[in-house]
Image (cartoon, rainbow, N blue to C red):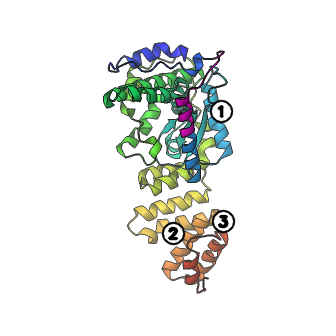
Amino acid sequence: MQRAVAVIVWMLAACATRPPAPAVPPWTALTGTAVSIDADERALWDKAEDQHAKLAQKNLLVTDPALAAYLQSVLAALQVEPIPAEAPRPAVYVIRSSDRTAISFANGEILITTGALAVIQNEAQLAGMLGHELGHVLARHALIDARFAKTSRSTVERMQLAREHEAYADAYAVQAMSGAGYDPHEMPRMLQLIASNETEAPQMEPFRSHPFTRERIQTLTEHMADAHGQALRTDAERYDHAIVDVLSVAAQAELDAGLLDHANASIARLLALRPESGRGYYLKGEYARLTEREGRRSPTVRDAYKRAVELAPDDPEAVRALGFLYRDDGDLAAATPLLDRYLKLAPDAADRGLIERYLGRNHP
């Protein structure tokens, strides 16, 4: 991104000296020229597509057309410079993960986690995260890294290059945010929100090598330019409207990962935005079951499960949870219709045989 050069210079000044990286022009510098894609770059694209297919097979990709369209619209606002037809088209996908991060691949794919969407507070912060990954894609950093790894056996040198790439991508994001009318000061605020994730080992394999967040916050805070008096936007309300439905997915992933404080925050945000969410109350009950001393016998759990079934009578997990709670009480008259309903709602339930035995039926 040509107009970001001045910003990039000061961000790279702190990086240690290392052998030069392979010369790979960014996609934005190749518009109007005939572009030939080398075999090693195509191999990176193929590897990324394989990774995408594996995530889909594991049901880790979130299917939500409205959310996908929203994320793509924010990404499009950040990418104002043309790229050649041969270049990959940047695209955003959402992955079920308690990690709070995003990552990009050589084929233009950007993965953003449900954990990140749940903790980000506004559209400007989202633009900062997507803009950072877009900077990596357009600068072809994955190809540079792969080629540099063939010439340098030094872990230190590769880490130095990684830091340079992070600095470049941050600079790109800040410049792209400003150009799209977003407040660039939301970039370090976004990084601060996700910084706590580095105290835990990332849950998903693609995100295990995305370091340096605290360094990036410090650098951005020290060198962030003023907003030049512009009326820059954050669009918190629009962001909340776009991501409200994914908050339950995020909370479930966080509960599954044992990140209970994260899950509690996601559940609270969901119920604040959608007070009549049956799924939100089910998750509130699950959080209380895992954190309160009485477990499933906690009054908080009971009230949450009952409210969940009242608001979402077709949610099989909520119906099952309340049915088992009544069974634990010895109240079979209340438990039986709920467990019956659960089996109708989830005909392929893995625990069908167990529940039918509870109901006094023979299971073939």
> Gap in Å between the C-alphas at discs 3 and 2?
18 Å
Per the rendered image, the range of residues in magenta is 31-47
Which of pointers 3 and 2 lies earlier in the amino acid sequence?
2
Coordinates of residue 2 in the picture (x, y in percent): 54, 14
Identify the mark at residue 73; answer none if there is no mark.
Answer: 1
Which of pointers 2 and 1 lies earlier in the amino acid sequence?
1
The residue lying at 40 percent from left, 29 percent from top is 149
Callout 3: helix, strand or loop? loop
The residue lying at 58 percent from left, 33 percent from top is 107
Kindly identify the amino acid type of the residue bearing the numbered disc 2.
Arg
Q: Is residue 222 above or below residue 262?
A: above
Residue to which mark 2 is pinned: 302
Question: Label 1 neighbourhood size at 10 Å, few (<14), some (14-19), many (20+)?
Answer: few
> Gap in Å between the C-alphas at discs 2 and 1?
42 Å
Residue to which mark 3 is pinned: 314
Callout 2: helix, strand or loop? helix
- Name the foreground residue: 65 vs 54: 54
